[in-house]
Amino acid sequence: MTIRIESTDLTIEAVLERRPHTVWISPEMTLAGFGARLRLDPGVGPGRFERARLMFAEWVASEGAHPAPDIGPFGFASFTFDEQVAGSIIVIPEVVVASDRKSSWLIRHGAEDNEWSDSPLGTTAVKPDRPRFAGSSLPDHLWLEAVAAAIKRIEEGQLQKVVLARDHALWSKEPFVLDRVLDKLHQRFPDCMVYLVDGLVGASPELLIRRRGESVTSLALAGSARRDPDPVVDDQLGSELLASSKDLHEHALASESVERVLERVCQSLQRPNRPGLLKLANVQHLATPFAGNLTESHDVLDLVGMLHPTAAVGGTPTLDAIEMIRALEGMERGRYAGPVGIFDLAGDGEFAIALRCAEISGARARLFAGAGLVQGSVPEDELEETRIKLQAMLSALE
């Protein structure tokens, strides 16, 4: 198979109206996939990222494809948070509409011409039903007890940080319209990475890793505060976050977990001395960006495997935190907080941490949000933080 490339002038909005099955929208690149030429399961265990790369390479070779740098073909990937849990997936669409903000093109992975032109246009004319609450794996009072137990273990010195998440199930009389959800997320969170892979849809602010040749970038987020419509109050909340010893400690653990990995594989790694603020529509975070050049030939999936899970979504020490999550969280995260993104055969790609997301299947949705716990955390404050974070997806489903 020779990859067929065609120029197009479609905008992001026009592409979303065609109801793509797979989506990646970032400040650097947009990919929208239609159909599924192949779906690959990399399995479980520490070798799953390497298997994903090899399976993709084998498919390209079997098709007789001729990869083109920055052109394709591309794989869309979504991995489970816990390597012991099945459910990771790589999707290779039949058709991909790609844009790098300078130009746009179609990539056909063997699709016939009409497979693109026959894609439906426009959102449904039927007004969607309101989402209705269907419960959580742990009711609020039990989740608060789990948080209190985790904080007690932190205060006893068993670990420094753990992230506990909760889910929020919804149902509707009508199926949720994914193109409408994607459009709302993109409009409200233009600086986030908006994604749809096998029913997992969301808008993540946290770039796990971006690789372009030897250049790599990452963004560590931890420590949060709400936004306020009053600019004076909003600025005050941001200033308090920047001065909070508890939040600065939580953030330092997250950024150090990224720095330890990137220092091993990069030269001239750059990062600011102190975190800044990343202000989103519903929440503001302490943020530390990283940029460097690779000293060895590590592809993007190698780097994902080295970085995941960062302390921003797992904890410190990592293995102790993961065991505590399994023991206390009371739910299966699935692909929430796992790596989600795109990659090509050259080893380039972009991966976010799957945050601000929901698993959607027809008229059912399962939303997720987490909170980082350190010494000094207060259970009721952490519950409120998850409620604020859940609003990102709740507003997109309304």
Image (spheres, helix red, strand yellow):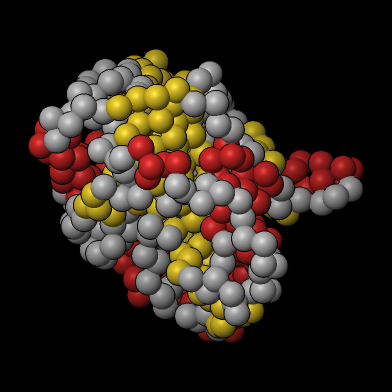
Q: Is residue 216 left or right of residue 192?
A: left
162, 23: nearer the viewer:
23
Kindly tell me whether residue 38 is visible in this rendering. Answer: yes
Residue 35 point in image, percent of width and height = 35, 50
- What residue do we see at 14% from left, 35% from top? 63
Along the line of sight, the residue nearer the viewer: 95 or 282:
95
Residue at image position (61%, 51%) is 122
Q: Position of residue 271 (x, y in %)?
A: 50, 25
Q: Total number of numbered labels?
A: 0
Where on the picture, by quarter, is residue 75?
Answer: top left
Quarter of the image with the C terminus in it:
bottom right
Report x, y in % for residue 324.
36, 68
Outermost residue toward the top in this view: 268
Task: Tell me the residue at 41%/75% (across/down).
Answer: 331
Q: 351 left or right of 151?
A: left
- Where does the N terminus fall, quadrant-wise? top left
Residue positioned 28% across, 57% down in the render = 88
Q: Nearer the viewer, residue 103 or 329?
A: 103
Left or right of 70 in this view: 388: right
Residue 395, given in percent of the width and then of the height, sits at 68, 61
**Whether residue 171 is situated above or below residue 254 in the rendered picture:** below
Q: Can residue 168 be seen? A: no
Q: Nearer the viewer, residue 207 or 310?
A: 207
